Amino acid sequence: MIRFIIIFLIVLTNVTFAEIKKVNIVGNARVSSATIESLVDKKISNIDSIYINNLTKKIYDTDFFADVKISFNQDALTINVIENPIVNFFYINGVKDSDLDQVNKIITLKENSIFSSSKLKKDIEATREFLNASGYYQASITPEVIKIDNNQINLIINIDKKEISKIKNIYFIGNKYFSNTQLLDVITSTEDGWWKIFSSSALSEQRIEYDKQLLKDFYKSKSFYDAQIESAFASIDKNNKFTLTYSINSGKKYKFGDYDIKVSGLALKEVDINEIKNISNKLLKNEFYSPLTINKINKQITDFLETKRYGNFEINIQDLKVADDKINIIVQLNEGQKSLVNKINIKGNTITEEKVIRDNLIISEGDQLNSSKVKKSIDNVKSKQLFSKVDYKIEDSDKKNFKDLNLFVKEQPTGSISAGVGYGTNGGLFEASVNERNFLGQGINLNFTGRLSSDVIRGELSFVDPNYKNSNKELAASLFSEVDDYSNSGYQNKRAGTRFATKYEIYEDIFFRPNLGVQFDKLEVTGTASSLLRSRQGDFVTTSLGYNFSYDQRDSKFSPTSGSIIYFDQNIATFFSDILTVQTGVGATFYKELFSEKFIGSAKARLANVVAFNDKDVKLSDRIFASASDIRGFEQRGLGPVDSGDHIGGNNLATLSLKSTFPNPIPENLRATTFLFLDMGNVWGADYSSSISDSSKLRTSTGIALDLMSPIGPLSFTYSIPLSKASTDKEQNFLFNIGSSF
């Protein structure tokens, strides 16, 4: 009892039961007394140390003051403050113009702003993170705070970026099951090498932390449920090169054990419950544990229930570790409100603006969480080819009936320099291109392509903005120049032109692409040219309006395994053109899994026609030629109607290409695709003269192709053998392409 009385008296001495009737503000010059007084709760009747401490913190949090002292006497509260100084002069030293704008955006302290040590600390840390992400791991930042009169300061931020911290070697300790090459393909950090002239191998703390999560997810996907990335550390050598080491504890491999399906409130038919059990049984039986398998179960059950029109439902799949290295699975199906999207969090993008990723999502915060929309959104992001990996995870949020959608991307070099060579009947072919698919991190595609052969010189520059000024419309422009020099045949055709286009979705999966083009032609001939070509020489101007409709139901734009894409297009020469023509095309490609996911078959068909009006002939540059991808094994202009040995193109084209991928022994990290193909078709129809050779023989070819990602960049090999041809056709059996990414 005595102890209780003593404690009560101690507490009582620290509490003053009084009402605040007056507030005295002392020391303020710039901040008004009213602003400070607005923070005071005058209605409270017990003024104790807790109240004083809370009020002191509240005033400090405004960042207006360097010091705050509060006292209470009878009914008067006195607040003594020392104001933070004003920044009179601000300067960033040691940063070039290329980074200065970004650093200025990061630093919140500016001239005429209120200075505080907490603001300065945050600014320095944010700047350090930016420099680190840019590869300046050893950058130092030293602030100079110079006090001057009238409670002002001059602030100078000295930045020494030092050299970019290059990663010489990356090692994995504890890695027992996978090669270093496989793990290097998982992470975003890369080793420096002579072939990586344009790519980044800079050390970055943010990238390392992200890599740790990628490695953990990779091991878990390979059945190592308990895998941990215990540490990641970097050591520097005398040449300022780093060795990055990841320490891995993979743990044991797990298999799927038992599974159970629980239904709560959802009126499922017995036959449908059995079907759901079959879905789980097929995917889980005797299989090693993998989150990918769980995602497949979730997707297939979702698709099944949506097909059966069961209304609102929720699917929750739990994985539970049990004895004997097994993971049990519980599939919980609930009735009720479908989950809504709370937040969409995007991680892994250091170069690409977040806006570029969000522009490709068809699901937004607040939308109903729909699996098909999530899948299509992920596929849209993949199709931009800005990332080597795109994955997602749905997690619980702090709101009821809401989920967070977390997107994980792994950036890849988006710039490339490539060169290709081919050889055929008419000699060699050389092609080169420079391409940047993510200009300024905004997803803008810039491309220049050059082509040189014994007969053709061509250059083309193109620009594509997939979301011009946030309009959800694509804007594209191109400029080209070409010289077709067939001096042996006595003619030269010079062409130059430009084209502008836009593209947008007018209905679900239906896209419309109008375009406008201008082209200038000059056909020059000599005495060795055929009489037909001599009669068609001259200068021509063509202004054309065109459009394209496409219906895209592929399961993936990036790597389709099922579905189809169908298109129809026309280009119409206007009345401002020398020759009025209409070019029409229709085509379709179908995809289907044949025997397993390793065998993806496709069938591609294409029809095209061009016709001229007012009793005129289609000019040479508007005639149809089969491309090297239409009928492989033949040159770009190597088949169709012939005039005095020259291929002049046709009025019609029809092609069909059958293709199938198949497994190959090439290591997975090289991302190799091998396929066999069978091409067939023809170009025919010559409205010039009946004397022109116009073979109706069906051309066919077969061959094998290999695409892979090598340490020096993408490689492509194609070998084709014509099976049927005309005597006038020109073959091209072998094509090889090599590229370097940056």
Image (cartoon, rainbow, N blue to C red):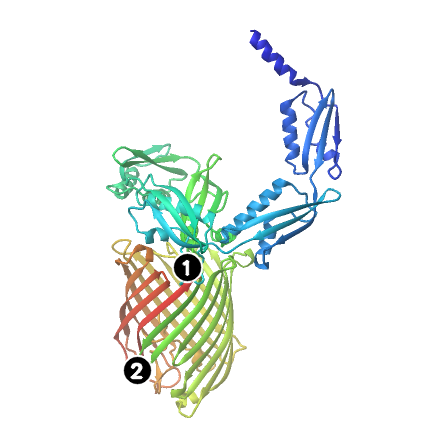
Q: Is residue 738 above or below residue 370?
A: below
Q: Position of residue 422 (x, y in %)?
A: 34, 74
- Identified by mark 2, the residue type is Thr
Residue 460 percent location from the top left of the image: 47, 72
Q: Nearer the viewer, residue 1 or 590?
A: 1
Question: In the image, 356: left or right of 173?
Answer: right
Q: Amino acid at mark 1?
A: Tyr
Vertical relation: 600 (above or below) 173: below
- x 42%, y 42%: residue: 394
Q: Which residue is more in the foreground, 277 or 58?
A: 58
Residue position marked by numbered label 2 in the rendering: 728
Q: Position of residue 249 (x, y in %)?
A: 33, 41
Q: Quadrant of residue 382?
A: bottom left
Could you tell me how far apart the alpha carbons at marks 1 and 2 are, in whole angstroms? 38 Å
Q: Nearer the viewer, residue 521 or 266?
A: 521
Whether residue 672 sits left or right of residue 312 in the image: it is: left
The residue wearing badge 1 is: 551
Quarter holding the N terminus is top right
